[in-house]
Amino acid sequence: MKNWEKNVRKVVPYVAGEQPKNKNVIKLNTNECPYPPAPGVERLKEEMNLQDLRLYPDTDSTDLVNELAKYYHVDPEQVFVGVGSDDVLSMAFLTFFHGTEPILFPDVTYSFYDVWADLYQIPYCRCLLDEDWTINAGDYIQPNGGVIFPNPNAPTGLYEPLEKVEQIVKQNPDVVVIVDEAYVDFGGVSALPLVEKYDNLLVVQTFSKSRSMAGLRIGFCIGSKKLIKYLNDVKFSVNSYTMNRPSQLLGVEAVRDDAYFKATTAKIIATRERVKKELAALGFTFPDSKTNFIFATHKTVPAQELFQALRAHNIFVRHWNKPRIENYLRITIGTDEQMDTMIAFLKEYLANK
């Protein structure tokens, strides 16, 4: 090892879902929305003045913050935006998880959490999900430096009732509790109303899934004014210009078109429920997903085999070689046509086993 390498911060990085170079694939591996953004986003894109890109963006993302505050009925001082919810979450880890006690999160969950904890040298403890993939709230009644969990969870897709969420928040008044709601628009009830009751609660959401804007990287969180001020203090100590001008402007249009947003999520939910029935008829089992994906295992055929077979036919789903979930596939909900193609392939493949 070179001497300079001794001072390098070494971490095992997060591995994102594969982005295939071949565009002629059915891409069901990264939980993107299969439908385009709101029509207003398209119109504004055509009207944007590219000359403005020579200027720095608004450091406070004022228009987007105000639009989100209006939509979610909170004060602008309660809203923080970032470059995707990953940026928001990373900033929250850096800001709030700074104690000597371990932070707590589920053992089967979003795999970026332990990466950020390692990067920022935060001690952590994984709390085992129950056999039915649900969170045991009692596991979060122990000394800790903070709590984070997705609701609905990823990759399991399960939604925890708001009563359980509040139980965890209420039992941890001396640390920050983060509820990661990347998928809440597909069938869950947001914990946002609890923000007014608990000043240590931070609720994080994203435009990447239900608002069809993964490519623009827009995320946000809502919390007490004090939490948001602390987040902004850290943000402005790292990079004042995190969100670009097009993202700010187009994000506003996405929030304004509530009818399109609700119609899009309704289509995905309807497709998901139909595909659940078809997968069950083919011998798959899965938790009751309230997300835009299904976390499925087959009764006889290993997940790795199915993953490879699907991939060979240009159908991409997600598979992890990790404890407890190595025999599961995470299947993003695409268009009806995409899902029909996948189901047709699985029917033929399983019939020939």
Image (cartoon, rainbow, N blue to C red):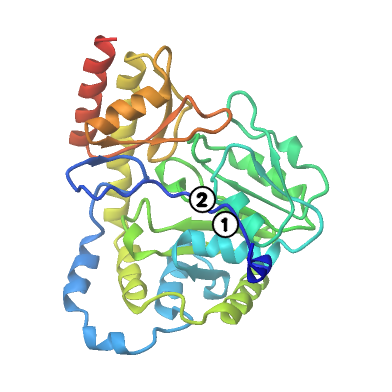
In-image side of 184 versus 191 (left or right): left
Q: Say which of 256 and 212 sits in front.
A: 212
* Residue type, mark 2 in image: Glu
In the rendered image of this protein, does residue 124 appear above or below residue 344?
Answer: below
**SS at circle 1:** strand
For disc 1, the marked residue is 203
For disc 2, the marked residue is 181
In-image side of 203 versus 342 (left or right): right
* Residue type, mark 1 in image: Val
Displayed quadrant of residue 164:
top right
- Residue 177 locus on image (x, y percent): 68, 54
| Chain-order first, disc 2 or disc 1 | 2
**SS at circle 2:** loop
Q: Say which of 319 and 42 sits in front.
A: 319
- Residue 288 locus on image (x, y percent): 46, 28
Asked whether the beta carbons under mark 2 and mark 1 sit within 8 Å of each other, the answer is yes
Dot 1: few (<14), some (14–19), or many (≥20) neighbours within 10 Å? many
- Residue at 19 percent of width and 29 percent of height: 341
- Residue 130 locus on image (x, y percent): 65, 27
- Residue 214 locus on image (x, y percent): 35, 57
